Image (spheres, grey):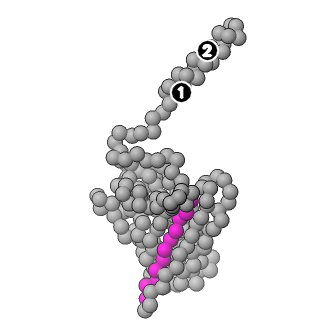
Amino acid sequence: MSKFKFLGVVVLAGLVIVGCKKDHHHPEHNHEHDESELITTVQLNFTKKGVSDSTFTVLFNDPDGTGGNKPISFDTIRLDVNKTYTCDLILLDKSKNPIDTISNEVLEEADDHLFFFTPSDNDALSVTINDKDSKGRNLGLKTSWVTKTKSLNAGTVKVKLMHQPGIKDGSSAQGETDVELDFPLVIK
């Protein structure tokens, strides 16, 4: 085969591959999920319930997103033993100006999203989801955290957001992971 004929076959094959590019738009969605959406910041706003409620924030901040530079902030969750906390979770894309609040989109698309909170030590902490989607299924932007035992090294709490358009069933077995972080946990 001559060089020109071979080059022609390669170019034609390339055009066919480009022409058959996979379409990421799913007609069953009522929205367009931005595949390149960046979550740079996960903010956990805690309120400790008691005689006088106190608030504090735990932060994960990775300005360039997954895979680039290390996060500039990855706080430890520090909770008191035998206490109840409420937590509001906020997702941000700080690479945009103005800052994009991704958790607003998650709330708008609640039927397609689900957070999971998995403590490495279930004897030390339990997390309950307090908000629901339009079909009465868990969402996870609002939660309650109850500490049970003292543990200076309670391990971690995995915070995971799954995008599950049309397949949300309460499990993390299906869908795409939008964010997954293992926050260090201390209960004192």
Q: Outermost residue, left direction?
A: 135
Label 1 neighbour load within 10 Å: few <14, some 14-19, many 20+: few
Q: Amino acid at mark 1?
A: Val
Residue 146 seen: no
**For the point 64% across and 62% down, which residue is it?**
71
Q: Which residues are magenta?
A: 40-50
| Pointer 2 or 1: first along the chain | 2
Pick the front one: 4 or 115: 4
Answer with left or right where residue 84 lies relative to residue 110.
right
Magenta stretch, main secondary structure, is strand
Q: Helix, strand or loop at disc 1?
A: helix
Residue type highlighted by circle 2: Val
Q: Is residue 34 above or below residue 84?
A: above
Is residue 142 part of the magenta span, yes or no? no
Q: Which residue is mark 1?
A: 18
**116 over 167 or under it: above or below:** below
Calculate the distance from the C-alpha at mark 2 to the C-alpha at mark 1.
14 Å
Q: Image point 29% across, 59% down: which residue?
A: 134
Q: Position of residue 168 (x, y in %)?
A: 37, 52
* Vertical side of 36 occupied by 58: above or below: below
From the image, which quarter does the N terminus lie in? Answer: top right
Extreme residue in the front direction: 97
Is 75 placed left or right of 148 in the picture?
right
- Quadrant in the picture for residue 8: top right
Task: Give the left or right position of residue 39, taking residue 33 as reference.
Answer: right
Between residues 36 and 179, which one lies in front from this camera angle? 36
Choose top left, top right, bottom left or bottom right for residue 158: bottom right
**Which residue is painted at 57% across and 70% down in the image?**
59
Write down the residue under mark 2: 9
Say which residue appears at 52% left-offset and 47% top-offset: 36
Q: Position of residue 182 (x, y in %)?
A: 58, 64
Visible residue check, residue 25: yes
